[in-house]
Image: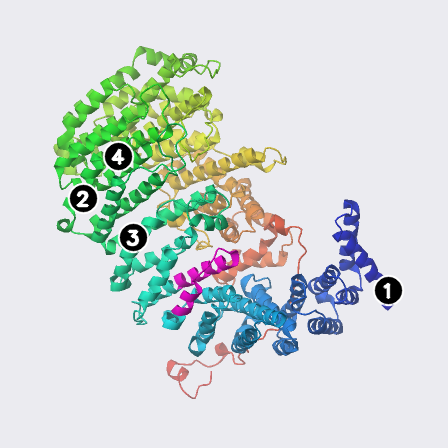
Amino acid sequence: MADQVAAMCEQLIKAVNVIMDAETSHIYRLEALKFCEEFKETNSFCVPCGVQLADKSQPAVVRHFGLQILEHVIKFRWNNMQQQEKVQLKECAMQLLSKGTRSILEEESHIKDVLSRIIVEMIKREWPQHWPDMLKEMEALTSEGEAQTELVMLILLRLAEDVITFQTLPSQRRRDIQQTLTQNMESIFSFLMAILHLNVEDYRKLKGSQEHELAHCRVAVATLNTLAGYIDWVSLVYITTGNCQLLEMLCLLLSEPELQLEAAECLLIAISRKGKLEDRKPFMLLFDDVAIHYILSAAQAVEVVERRYIFLKRLCQVLCALGGQLCSLVGSDVEVDVPANLNKYIEALLAFTTHSSQFLKSSTLATWGALFRHETLSKEAVVVEMAIKYLRASMTNLVKTGFPSRDDNPSCHHSRVDFDSDEDFNTFFNSFRAQQGEVVRSACRIVPLEAFQIAAEWLQYQIASPIDMGDATSKTAEGLCSILSPSVVQWDAMTVFMECMTTQIFKSLEEEKLPIDQSMELLQAVLNYDTKDPLILSCVLTNISALFPFVIHRPHFLPQVLYKLFSAITFDVAQDNKAPRTRAVKNVRRHACSSIIKICRDYSQFILPCFDMFYNHVKKLFTSDATLTHMEKCSLMESLVLISNQFKDFAKQKAFLDELMAPVVTEWTSDEMRHVLWDPATFLSFVGADQVVTEQSTDTDTAGLNRGRLSFCLYAMLGVVKRAHWPADLEEAKAGGFVVSYTSAGTPIYRNPCTAQFLVMLPNLLALIRYTCGSTLCLTQHLLSTYDSPVYRTNLERMQGFFNMLYDNCFHVLGNAGMSLQQEFYTIERLAEEIAGSVFVSLDHVPDHRLRPMIHILVCLCLVLSCPPEYYDSLLCPLLGPLFAYMQLNVKWQVINQRTSINQVTQEMLEEQLVRLLTREVLDFLTATNKEEIDEEDMMMDSVQSSLPAQPTAELTELGKCLMKHENIYMSLLTLSFTSLSWKDTTNCHRTASIVCWTLLRQVVGGNLLPEAVTWFYTSVLRSLQVHGQHEVCNSTLTQLAMLIYENLRPRYMELKAVMTQIPNISVEALDQYDHRLMDPNAQKVGEKKRKDQFKKLIAGTVGKALCQQFRKEVHIRNLPSLFKKPKSDKDILKTEAIGLAALFSPDNDL
């Protein structure tokens, strides 16, 4: 036998060398791999060969393969081995631990890893029942040297990971091992602490003796890593025992460069623990001088070396976790006092906040926010003082610097470690700044006047400072800044700070305490500031908007503000108006328009006295400034409509709107426009879509002007329909003539002053929709540039953009008409036929990304959410029936599922995502149509709610009940919802199964469904389990749905049992028992949970596996005799005599 083993080992060594040799051909490597795998699977010499190959005299790759053979035997042959063979293998493995490794510094890490795996695999199968002394044997091994001690640490760590973290065992084995670990946790922790203490002491003593020092350091690191694996889940008692001895030792180790990272990670895991507040109270000891001193000392003089920088991140997280414990404990029921040296802790936190690393700054934000919002701590003098310091620090932190590609700031060095590219940094900083804004607002709540003073000083400084363009000037205009210029980033940061401060100061201070005079001085300085740089002017406009709420108290400033905004609307840097505007200039003009709209929306009553001046200025701009774009003109018209809502007089407002919209109505209803919009060929010629694209042609041609005319009409129509409204107060609406009658329920019926214009323009709008739905082209997106460049577009891109704009605006107009006009819109004669003949006439030609806005804007907003119930039958049912019939998206999903090509991957991924988004939009619509009160919690039922109640109580909406009366619509809804369960979209599957399917199906449970239909519904659910069953949340939801269908329909449909019998590996006997309990009213009933578990086992054969699991060899670990089985009582209480309450509590009763 020895000769056979030696010969086989020789062949295996050759095979391993062939596999690992880079020069080996592919065929030889495959043959060698096949030989090795067949040996592991079938050969009876696996154990002796594995032990021989694992000898430390062999090369590392050979030893690793030998140990892999032993691991394979344990994982896949253990259940078939004789007891003697198991004992022999265990002794061989323990001998390898004791004598089979080289010294701790020489041994390869992958050898240590596989050796620890071997031991852990045996522990998972035999401990504690058949290997009760395992822990003692591990402890004894540590006395044999540093190498053995490190291996023991690796074994204990991997055991905790497999049992607790990854849970790679059957539930009973996991429970046995976890309970045994818990029972022995005191001795395990004492053992780990002793090993750590001993090796740290030896490490310190032997500093300078390179080899011995590193050996003890290696053991200490392994022990800390093992502690980290246990600290996360053990009882807090073991962490805080001995007056937090463990935490104290970890704090001390922060001063050891070779151990500080692992110590910080252990400390972080410990302090981040949740649990009872009473158990966490000892963590407050870390606020003592000693612990804070060690944390502060460790943070000093940290250079950007990767390991040290990682340590600094962990240390920052430790401080933040400590702050989380502080906020939880102070002010709670456990009566924890504010720490005496809270100032030292906050100073340490501020040190990280002012560090040059942007990542470290961002890590502290959540803690600052918690401190500033805390009911008790925010009132402490230390925190109030620190809030001011934080606000001053944020003046630096809000500045967008630190791009990895640049070297103009100390943070750039750290950014090169943290971010792969400028795009990554840009994404991070946008999120970082948003979080900073929240914290700045919280700090402003504590010190509002001081925050105002800081903002005022910063704004005055920026106004007084000369513009610094830096080295990143604009590529298109001399003397202008880019978005990376020093002045721009400073103005940008200051603007963010100003917005945060002003939004909070009005909430925090009473009116008489507001700094009105100082704010007016600031506003005057901003209004007087004149700049020709568009990027800086954009910041100036934001500051004007931020300070505008103060103008309410000084109305005489209003004309100056409006004139400043009007001048920005016509802003341009080039004298020649024919030159293309840069993106920055366009943004300034749009910014000014948005600011005016916002002011008119929020302060329309305040601006009303200036309406005539406003209107006259707008008319003057329209006639004198030819450079105004159509969107800018429509924005000004929108602002006027918002102010006109304050007339609160129907006749006056209607007269104004008639005057305002007269040119638009005339243009839109002209004979020329009607001829264009009602004839496809004329329309295409009118907009230039029938012309050959030539880039030499300019956009001042007739077709370009025609497209502008159409755009202006649509923008104007949208602005008026969207903004014109009646007074919110019923009495004011009645007095102004807006209320025409009341419904039978007593709800007032209003009239909108823009209805007349809309009704006149509606026929041509529907005609336009009819011919644009099928003509929509996809507009390519421009890449973002950090530099400012003219918005040059090809003629093809202009045409695509035009059609996209037409498509979106048409649906926005219709969608807003439903919400704004309400009864007046839904009573339009033949509205359903008109919409069906225009919107739904060319659905086959509309791409997926254009169907989404149609469903969301038009159908959801206009038809479903705004339509009064009395028009459901006449309007919605005729429209929604054909739409739901069309929206059977099965063909699209079949195309996606059948794709096998590897070409055009990006395009196919994009198409799949679009189909997925469209599917969710459709199902959201279906859900909103049929289920009552869909709130955010219903929409996000993931791991929080993994199963449904036995009988869901979701009720249909009134619209849903109306749709149920139409069999064709109802069957379309059922077909769509049940078919969608099998589409490869887990989010859609979960939501549809939990919210929609049973809500719809239960309506006809008592009806006369065809057996084929019932079978199809049930098999659809089982089919979706095949697709999505590997996902726990979907599995639970689909199982619940299948159970509901089976239990409610099985008594009437024998076909369901026939479906069940076709499930692979189903137990017919168990199925018969389940059926018997279900069908026989006299059968013994079982509890809900037990019934659900039984049903889950019945349909387990339908559950599909994830792709990564389908070809994986199963590992089977047998359960051992239970350690903790409760002994059964010998006495049968039911057969004994009746026991009264008095006898039950009698001391003589031994029940």
Residue at image coords 42%, 39%: 926
Assess disc 3: are there few (<14), some (14-19) or many (≥20) residues with their C-alpha within 10 Å of its C-alpha.
some
As displayed, is residue 1111 above or below residue 811?
below
Identify residue for label 2.
Answer: 519
The x and y percentages for residue 192 are 55, 74
Magenta: predominant secondary structure element? helix
Assess disc 2: are there few (<14), some (14-19) or many (≥20) residues with their C-alpha within 10 Å of its C-alpha.
some
The kind of secondary structure element at disc 1 is helix
As displayed, is residue 108 above or below residue 392?
below
**Front-lying residue, 377 or 912:** 377
Q: Is residue 841 visible?
A: no
Tell me: 99 left or right of 364. right
As displayed, is residue 923 above or below residue 679?
below
Q: Which mark is residue 84?
A: none
Q: Are marks 3 and 2 in contact (CB under 8 Å)?
A: no
Q: CA distance from mark 2 to mark 4?
A: 19 Å
Identify residue for label 1.
Answer: 4
Identify residue for label 3.
Answer: 392
Q: Earlier in the sequence, mark 2 or mark 4?
A: 2
Identify residue for label 4.
Answer: 595
Residue segment shown in magenta: 292-321
Q: CA distance from mark 1 to mark 4?
A: 88 Å
The kind of secondary structure element at disc 2 is helix
Q: Amino acid at mark 2?
A: Ser
Q: CA distance from mark 3 to mark 1?
A: 79 Å
